Amino acid sequence: MAFQKPSHTFTKIHLKGLRTNSLYILFALSFTVLINTFSFAQELPKKNTTIPATKKNDSTVVVKDSTKIAIDSLLNKPINTKQTDSTEQDSVKPEGFLKDIVTYKATDYVAINQRKQQIRLYNEAQVLYEDMEITAGVIVIDYSTGLVYAGRIKDSTGYSQNPIFKQGANVIEPDSIIFNYDNKKAIVFNTRTEQQGFNVLSPKTKRENDSTYFMSDARFTTSENLDDPEYQFVTSKMKFVPNKKMVVGPTYMEIYGVPTPIALPFAFFPMTKKQTSGIIFPSFGEDTGNDRGYFLQNGGYYFAISDYVDLAVLGDYYTNGSYGLRLESNYAVRYKFRGNMAFRYENLLNSERGFPDFRQSTIYNIRWSHSQDAKANPNSRFSASVNLGSSQYYQQSINQLNQANFLNNTLASSVSYSKTFQGEPQVNLSLTATHNQNTNTEAINLTLPTMQASMTRVYPFAPKSGTKEGAIQNINFQINTRGEYRINTTDSLFGKREMFDDAVAGMRHSIPVTTNFKIFNHFSVSTNANFEETWTLKTTKRNNIFVGETSTPVDINGFDRFLTYNFGASIGTTLYGMYNFQKEGKDPKIQAIRHVVRPSLSYSVSPAFDQYYETYDVIDADGTTIDQVEYTRFENSLFGRPGNRYSSSIGLSVGNNIEAKVRSKDSTKTESEKIFLLNNLNFSTAYDLAADSLNISPVRVNGGTQILNKKMNINFGMTLNPYALDSNNNVIDKFNINNGGSLFRLTSANLNISYSLNNDSFSGKGKDEEEDEEAERRAATSNSRTDDLFGKTQDFADRRLTDKDRNKGEDEENNEFYNYKMPWTLRLAYAANYSNTRREDQISSHSLMFSGDIELSPRWSVGASSGYDFLNNGFTFTQLRFERDLLSWRMNFTWVPFSNRSSWNFFIGIKSNLLKDLKYDQRRQPDRQL
C-alpha cells in the first residue's frame, strides 16, 4: 500500500495509470450522486473496518465490529475482475468525461492500494472538479466491486464531518451511502430529505434509478422539528419520485409519538413543482341553525390551465336541497399585470318544502381585481376593482362571514382604462365604468362608461424662456370633456332589459381660463372664467294642464345643447404671529408658539339663462289660464339644468393653525422639535348680493388636531345659522339676535375621536407600519375599513384555498423571557352628532367602538371587537376571537355572542397546503330567519 504525503495543499492530477482510473470512478460516482440523490443518513463502518473484494455473487460486506449490512442484490452487477493494465483502462475511458483538472486533498492521508484496488481519503477529505465539491470524513472507493463508501468519522465526541455534496447552488448533506456506480443503484440508511414542504425520514432507502426510491418504515411530516415533531405519519412502505409524486401504503398518524386512530390504507401525494389539475376535497359538517341538514362544502376541481391562469370550480351541497357554486381564477403575467376573478352563486332553502317556515332565496356575488405593473406601459394603464351582486349576499351567504361588508350598506366597483398622449400640450384620455349599490334600498347606479378627456394647461402669453410674471403672462386655459351613460335601476331589475328604460346619456365640455398675480408683494390674486357646454340626447316637454292635474313630462329623443358661463376672483394672504418664551439664560420646555392665519376673500357671478326656460299653462274649467309654470326642457339633463337665477356672491374664509416649538426630550439633540397644537381651524361663509332675503349663508366651522404623540386624532365641526325660526320651525328673514336669541343658532355639530395604541406606545417606539399597510391592503380589496372595529372577516371558502402559513419568528423577547412583555393593540373610535336644524335639540348619534388583540404567549392570542351605543343604551356588533399557533397546525375560534348575527366557528387544521384537507371545522351559522 502506498501512502501519499499528508498535506493541506491541493494536488493536481491527470488521467494516467491507476490513479486516473480510480479518480474517474470517484467523479463518476460523485457526479451521479449529486444530481440524482437527496439526503441520506447512516453511519459507515468504523475507521478500521476492512472491506474486502466482493465476489461475483457476494451480497454482504463484513465490518470489523461484526456488524453485517445486507446489500440488496439489485446493487450487484457482475463485475469483470480481469486484471488490466493502465493502458487498457485509459483506452476504454469515455472520451471527454473529465473536462477539467481534478484537485483533491485530505488532512491525514490519501491512500491508494493497488492490491485491493481501493482509494481511501481520510479526515477532511475534499475533491474539487469544475463547479462540484465533495467533502466528507472518509471516502473509500472499491473499484474491484464497483462500490463506493462515503461517510463521517467517529471520535470521542460522537460523529463529525458528515458528507457534503455541492454543485452550484445545490447542497446535500447525507450521513452515509453505499453506491454501485455501474448500475447506479444505492442503499441508504436513516434517510432524511425535504421535498416541497414534506420532511421524510426512513431507516432504509433503496435507490432504484435516478428518479425512483423505495423506503420502508418511513415517516413524513411538515413539522420543522424533525427530532421531536408535533405530528407525523408512519407508513410501512413508500415509493418516492422526487418532484413528481409520493405513494404510501398503510399509514397511520402519530401526535407527539402517540399513535392515533387516524389511518389510511394508501395515499397519493403529487409533488410536481408545476401547477397540476386535480380534485379539491370538500369539508363536511351539519348546519343546525337553519335546518339545512348535513353538508359538503368547498369541494370541486382545480384546473391548471397554464402557467399564467388557473381556475377552481367549487360547490356546496346540503341535504335539504340547498346548494352553492363558485368559480375562482387567478392570472398573472410577470412585469405586465396580475389579478383574480370570482363568481359565487347560492340557492338557499330554509327548512323543508311544505313546512310553513319554508323559504327560498337566490343570491350571487361577482369579484374582480386587476392591477397593472407600473413599468409595463407608463402611458397606458388598466385597472379593475369590482364587488357587485345581490344586495343581501353578505347578509345571507352561508359560506363566509364578512362582518365589514355586512355592516357596510354600500358596494362599489370601478373598471378604468387611461391613456396619455405625450406632446405639447399633453392629452389624457380615460374610460371608466363604475357601479354603486345601496344594500339597504337595493338601488344601483351604473355608468357604462364615463369618458373623460383633458388637455394640460396652455399659457399662450408665457415667454419662451424664464419665469412667468404678471397677470398677462400667467393667463392659461385647458379643455376638459366628460361623457356619461348612466343607469339607475334596482336589484330586482339588474341584468334585465328593463334596466335600460330610464338610462340617460350626456356630455359636458368645459374651458376654464385662469390667471394669478401678486399685488403689494403680499396679496395673491386669482381670477377665473369658466365656459361650459352641455350636450344631451333626450329633452322633455310639458303640456298645458287643468287645475288639479299633475304635469307629466313627455320625453323627446334627439340631440340638444345649452351653454353656461360664470366668472370669479379671489384674493388672499398669509399672516404669521409669533410669541417667544425664550429669555436670556433660560431654556423653557415650550420655546415659542406660532399662529398662522390664511384669510381669503372671493367673488363669483353667474348670470341667469332664461333663454332655456319655457312655461306651460294651468287652465280652469272655463278654459281660462289662471297660472303659468316655468320649466326647462333640460330638467332631466345628466349634468343638471341651466340656472335661471342671477347669482352674485362674496365668500369669506379664514384658515388657522397653531404650532409650538419645544425642547427635545433627547438631550443629545441641539435643535428644537415642532409640534402642532391645532392642525387646522377653518371658518367660512358667504353673502349673496343678488338674493332678496336670507343673504348670509350659515357659518361653517371645522377643525382637527393630533395629540398623544399623534396617536389620537380629534376632528370636529359645526354649523352656525344667523337667522331665526318662526313658530313652525321654518327659517325666516330675521336675525336670531333680533329675535331674542344669540348671535348664531347652532344647527348641527359633530365630534370624532380615534385613538390607536399598542404595547410600544409608552416606550417611545412607533406603530408597526407593516401592519397598517397590510390592513389598508385588505380594506382596498374588500371595500371595508382599515381597522377591525367591525370585526375580522372570515371567508370559509377562501381560507380553504388561499390561506398561507403564518410565519411567526421567535425573537429574544418571545422565548423564556416572554413574560417581560405581552404584545397588544387597542383601537378606539368615538363619534357624536348633534342636530338642531328645526329645534330638535337632540343627539342624533353617540357611540364608542373599540377593537383589540393581546398575545398571552408567543402563540396564544385573543381579541375582541365591539362598541356601545349611548343613544340606544346597547352594545353594537360584538365579535370575540381566540387564536392558537400550534407550530405545524393552526387553531382559531370566533364567537358572535349576541344579536341576530349570533354565531361561532371553530377550526383546527394543518397549515401546509399539502395537507390542508386534514382539518376539523365546526360552526353555527346565524339564524337567517331573524
Image (cartoon, rainbow, N blue to C red):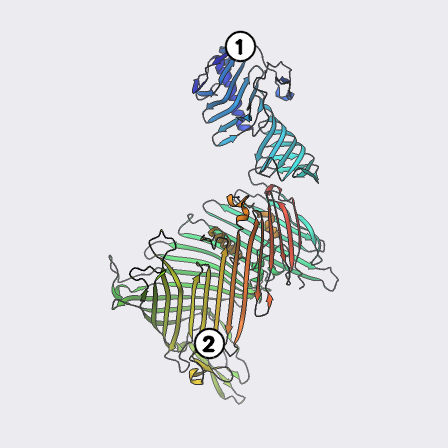
* 481 lies left or right of 847: left
* Mark 1 nearby-residue class (10 Å; few <14, some 14–19, many ≥20): few
Which residue reaches farthest right?
A: 354
Percent position of residue 278, x then y: 62, 42
Callout 2 secondary element: strand
* 338 lies left or right of 670: right
Looking at this view, is 157 or 806 the one in front? 157
Q: Is residue 164 above or below residue 62?
A: below
* Mark 2 nearby-residue class (10 Å; few <14, some 14–19, many ≥20): many
Q: Quadrant of residue 118?
A: top right
Percent position of residue 232, x then y: 64, 38
Q: Is residue 746 above or below residue 752?
A: below
Q: Count the labels in the image.
A: 2
Question: Which numbered disc, 2 or 1, marks the residue that appears first in the sequence?
Answer: 1
Percent position of residue 314, x then y: 62, 49
Please identify, in this view, whether the residue under mark 2 or under mark 1 is nearer the observer.
2
Residue that badge 2 annotates: 746
Residue 467 — which label? none
Looking at this view, is 13 or 500 the one in front? 13
Residue 482 visible (yes or no): yes
Look at label 2 and name its amino acid: Leu
Looking at this view, is 707 or 176 the one in front? 707
Look at label 1 and name its amino acid: Thr
Residue that badge 1 annotates: 84
